Amino acid sequence: MPTSSGDRMAEGPGLEVSDLVVGYGSTTIVHGMSLTAAPGQVVGIVGPNGAGKSTFLKGIAGATPVTSGTVRLDGREVTNLRGDRLARLGLGYVPQVKDVFSPLRVQENLEMGGYILPRRDVPGRMDEVFALLPTLKDLRRRTAGTLSGGERKLLAIGKALMTRPRILLLDEPTSNLSPDLALAVLAEHVPRLAEQGIGIVLVEQRVEQGLKACDWAYVMAAGVKQLSGPAAEILANEDIGALFLGQRSAVPESTAGNVTPGSPGTSGQ
């Protein structure tokens, strides 16, 4: 269970997304989605397949055009900025696929991840990433293409961490991983990053495990936010689980009133 978000939030507003509309060509996928995430907080986005979760993250990360709405990072509007500019401003992004350079060694991938840093700072930052993700240190001379799925995902996260992000977007970090490796990512690595003051926005299909790692969660369906609330309350609510997540919960229905639609205020997070 995550630490209280209020205990580990860093100063500053973090990520503020308002009424985002995102799509591909003439097809709109995300219809006015909003979200906030503070440094040190883990925010989850869950919902059925095709809900628009990954497209929403791509819009925030500048990987898919935003046609309406705003993205603010630490109070500065960054809507539709390129990925390199977002990285310089403190936003990291780990996509679901094409997240590492397979022909390169682990160390070389990390060096590529630190491309915005002064060259002299790269070795020191790499050591800091190794401290956060110790598995990578033992793999530093391995070619990324020879890594297991779990090792590869850790490398992708480490590569994004090289730029010292205040907010890190993780799109399906447990995709194609075994249950044990998925649990390690969600129950160990994600909380460890949050404890360092990094805000995490997590899109995750393993709903139960994902929500257990989160402080706050948003439920998306058909490209819009259906509701938001403390992740533990969303996970415990049987009606919500059956309607939006396709799961059942053993928690009595008396908890249903604890989660309400709408964006959280800072006091609720």
Image: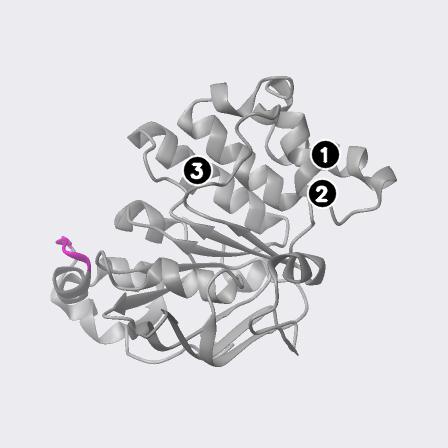
Q: Nearer the viewer, residue 107 or 238?
A: 107
Residue at image x 21%, y 58%? 48
Marked residue nearer the N-terminal end (1 or 3): 1
Residue beneath disc 2: 114
Relative to 4, residue 255 above or below: below
Residue at image x 20%, y 63%? 237
Report the magenta residues as a range: 245-250
Q: Are marks 1 and 2 in contact (CB under 8 Å)?
A: yes
Q: Main secondary structure of the magenta part?
A: loop
Residue 259 position within the rendered picture, expressed as x and y whole percent measured from the top left: 28, 73
Residue 55 position within the rendered picture, expressed as x and y whole percent measured from the top left: 38, 62
Q: Secondary structure at mark 2?
A: loop
Instruction: Kindly identify the amino acid type of the residue bearing the numbered disc 3.
Output: Val
**Which one is closest to the eye, mark 3 or mark 2?**
2
Q: Secondary structure at mark 1?
A: helix
* Left or right relative to 243: residue 50: right
Residue 2 makes an appearance in the image: no
Marked residue nearer the N-terminal end (3 or 2): 2
Q: Nearer the viewer, residue 103 or 133?
A: 103
